[in-house]
Image (cartoon, grey):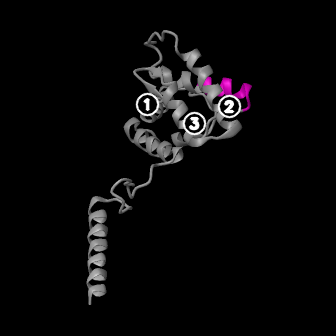
Amino acid sequence: MATLQVMLCLLGTVLVAVLAVDLEGFTTISPVVKQPTTPKLSVAQNLNKAAMECQSKQGVNQAFMGLLSTKNIPTNEKMRCFLLCVYETLGLVQDNKFQATNAKLMATQRFSGEELKKANHLIDTCNKTLSGPMEPNPKEFCLMGRLVRTCFKEEGDKISFFPKA
């Protein structure tokens, strides 16, 4: 009888713990380590999400999404502004400045080994290139969209690397 009571007590405790876990949206019953049921998005998923948001914000068609997977330098305002929107949404550009720390964080989430070394070299080089004073150009809106892409392409070509999600 005592064994049955102990088993029922344990079963009740487990059910309460599982119910509490489900209500809180966590996958573990450990009170110390709680992990959300929704996993962190990958770099590719974040890029896709940013691109979809920017496609809507910028009012551009689906063809602009292809710009993200090429080395093409934007040739018009819509392309520059779309790229700038994506870079800002990802945290690569804030207040019209390249954010090397955020770029390196993304690189560590996406690359490893030799690719990570190349990515960090590219980020450091572009950070130096883009860190100077940027005078707004009234004839070229969304200038940073072009400047970041140009640096990624030109400096990446020198080391045979182009950052893709």
Q: Earlier in the sequence, mark 1 or mark 2?
A: 1
What is the C-alpha distance between the residues marked 1 and 2? 22 Å
Q: Earlier in the sequence, mark 3 or mark 1?
A: 1
- The location of residue 54, given as percent across then percent down, is 42, 38
- The location of residue 82, given as percent across then percent down, is 47, 33
**Which residue in the structure is indicated by mark 1?**
88
The residue carrying pointer 2 sits among few (fewer than 14), some (14 to 19) or many (20 or more) residues within 10 Å by Cα, namely: many
User: Identity of the amino acid at label 2?
Assistant: Lys
- Classify the position of the C terminus by image quarter: top right
User: Identity of the amino acid at label 1?
Assistant: Glu
Chain part drawn in magenta: 150-160
Residue sitting farthest toward the front: 2
Examine the rendering and report whether any part of residue 165 can be seen.
no
What is the C-alpha distance between the residues marked 3 and 2? 10 Å
Of the residues tagged 1 and 2, which is closer to the observer? 2
Along the viewing direction, whichever of 45 and 107 lies nearer the viewer: 107
**Which residue in the structure is indicated by mark 3?**
107
Q: Quadrant of residue 113?
A: top right
**Which residue in the structure is indicated by mark 2?**
118
